[in-house]
Image (spheres, helix red, strand yellow):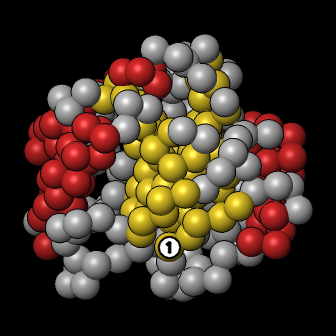
Amino acid sequence: MRLATWNVNSVTARLPRLVDWLAATKPDIVCLQETKTAEFPEAAVGELGYAVAAHGTGRWNGVAILSRVGLDEVDPGFPGEPGFPDPEARAIRATCGGVRVWSVYVPNGRTVDDPHYAYKLAWLAALREALAPELAGHERLALCGDFNVAPTDADVFDPGAFVGSTHVTEPERAALTALRELGLVDVVGRPLKGSNPFTYWDYRAGMFHQDLGMRIDLVYASRALADAVTDAYIDREARKGKGPSDHAPIVVDC
């Protein structure tokens, strides 16, 4: 089975690239984030054999799961999910080919003194509470998405450049640790170029070409699923060319 996750930064703007990538990479299950639409273009991916479960409001955020191995027990959001002030389209889960799959788009946090940062931490804490019973009921589970947190200093191009910023603070990283302590394994993709497993590069000129990025897109797998992984890579090629997302997909074979 091939599983992938990708923050597409608007599925409408990126649709031709997404369709071409799906046709070339042939993932069985794809988690998408930041779809930014209330009407997912199901017909375009349906021609490639994908069923779609989408959760979006049409403005910001938005998540989806595409599957060609079944799509059952679909649930948008999760119990206890906090809002800002109302719940946002940041999580969706479904069972695909015997794997319980979550696609999540964690709040950015903005700055450490912004109310959005407190919201981010509350959202991650609530996610942990919702995941615990899911893991108890599903031996094979994957939590995928844009977490907007770099797990360690090795996951940013220069730790000094992020001092005092979100994405690297101790409370954010502690929230990721708490998720892994449920029994999840961080499946780190191998970079296709260089030694940095970055998944995000700012659009500012030169950031991508200089590899000044971050690893904030993650695949957390249950132990049974992680033990079955045969390969995992970051598709840096998908970040190239005209009009790309600022994120690259992670592809996991298991």
Q: Is residue 167 left or right of residue 170?
A: right
The residue under label 1 is: 55
Q: Nearer the viewer, residue 33 or 108?
A: 33
Q: Nearer the viewer, residue 86 or 161?
A: 86
Q: Quadrant of the C terminus?
A: top right
231 lies above or below 24: above
Q: Is residue 82 left or right of residue 76?
A: left
Note whether residue 247 is visible.
no
Q: Position of residue 95 (x, y in %)?
A: 51, 49
Which residue appears at 56% of the width and 51% of the height? Answer: 31
> On the image, which quarter does residue 41 sit in?
bottom right
Q: Position of residue 148 (x, y in %)?
A: 35, 51
Q: Is residue 164 left or right of residue 64?
A: left
Q: Nearer the viewer, residue 76 or 133?
A: 133
Which residue appears at 56% of the width and 70% of the height? Answer: 54
4 lies above or below 15: above
The type of residue carrying mark 1 is His
* SS type, badge 1: strand
Q: Nearer the viewer, residue 95 or 82?
A: 95
> On the image, which quarter does residue 121 sit in?
bottom left
Q: Classify 10 Å Cα crowding around label 1: few (below 14), some (14-19), many (20 and above).
A: many
> On the image, which quarter does residue 24 sit in?
top right
